[in-house]
Image: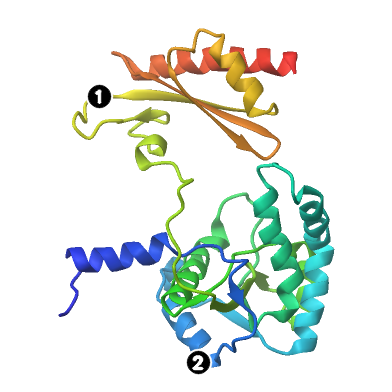
Amino acid sequence: MELLPGTDGYIDVVDHALTTTRAVRMRLDLEKPVEDQVLLDCIDIAEQAPTGGNMGSRRWMIIRDQATKDRLAELYLAAGGSWVIETAERLDGTNHPNARMMQGAKRLAESIASMPALVIPTIIGRHDGSGRPGLFDSVIQSAWSFMVALRGRGLGSVWTTMYLGQADAVAELLELPDDVTQICLFPVAYTKGVDFSPSKRRRPARDITYFDRFGQTRPSADDPTRVEVVAEADVKVNPAAVSSAIAESELADLRVDVEQIPGGSRVRVHAAGGDDASASRAALDARLLTIVETVRQAD
């Protein structure tokens, strides 16, 4: 039976591919060869992605030569991979929230030279340094499509940019012209098993989607007119200390989410929007910032 856009079967297939294309580090099969044609098929799929002005400026590098992979592995270590390995070893066996993640990063750093293939998407042109997306808005979507195409064929990868700390040396190694910009590195291999699942750590859309004004959510599907306001702040204090301070503050009766981020915590406070949601959010921002400043001073 043909699957048609808009039908449940079609939606299920597309959604499954998009939600189960994970960053794969620990489950890459380094022994199974990856055929050139499979990579080229994935690049053909990726090249269907939109591009600014319909310009065909993307160029793809596939690295197979072992000596070249060995050198890229050295550059990856120099760009930060050695630090990753040392940090992972230091955190191993601890309860640190990043310990598991660092083990995956360590495995990747140690395996670059052993990957069946390394793929680097590039684009002709140099960024203007303006801080705007510019050049990258014609290539990022294509690189993501490449990852999804890999997933559909039983392969996996991880989007890594750490090596760009040695971008000049990589460009020299690969003989890239001066006007070609590297985007990321994809270590590519077949995966050990294909049973990947959506992440349970992503926030639901209703929490992170704002309507008409930043910080204004519609928390209920049953009542689309109900508006909540959200205030957020990052603080370089551990989550336990932040949660304790919130519990003793005037925000204790509100919905408060505290999550760990690198170097500290991210605090999100939700409150009713009231008759003037913008004013309510401004007031909530002020209250949260006062408490955050108190936590900083007490730390």
In the image, 299 versus 63, the foreground residue is 299
Local packing at callout 2 (Cα closer than 10 Å; few below 14, some 14-19, many 20+) is few
Q: Quadrant of the C terminus?
A: top right
Which residue is label 1 attached to?
A: 226
Q: Quadrant of the N terminus?
A: bottom left
Q: CA distance from mark 2 to mark 1?
A: 53 Å
**Amino acid on which the number 1 mark rests in the picture:** Arg
Badge 1 marks a residue whose secondary structure is loop
Image point 41% across, 76% down: which residue? 152
Residue 39 is labelled as none
Image point 21% across, 26% down: which residue? 225
Q: Relative to residue 209, is residue 2 drawn left or right? A: left
Image point 77% across, 57% down: which residue? 84
Image point 17% across, 79% down: which residue? 2
Based on the displayed image, in which of its 4 quarters is residue 52 positioned?
Answer: bottom left
Which residue is label 2 attached to?
A: 37
Residue 70 in sight here:
yes
x and y percent of residue 69 in the render? 75, 82
x and y percent of residue 10 in the render? 23, 68
Residue 6 in sight here:
no
Badge 2 marks a residue whose secondary structure is helix
x and y percent of residue 106 in the render? 73, 62
Q: Earlier in the sequence, mark 2 or mark 1?
A: 2
Q: Is residue 103 above or below residue 265?
A: below
In the image, 225 versus 149, the foreground residue is 149
**Amino acid on which the number 2 mark rests in the picture:** Gln
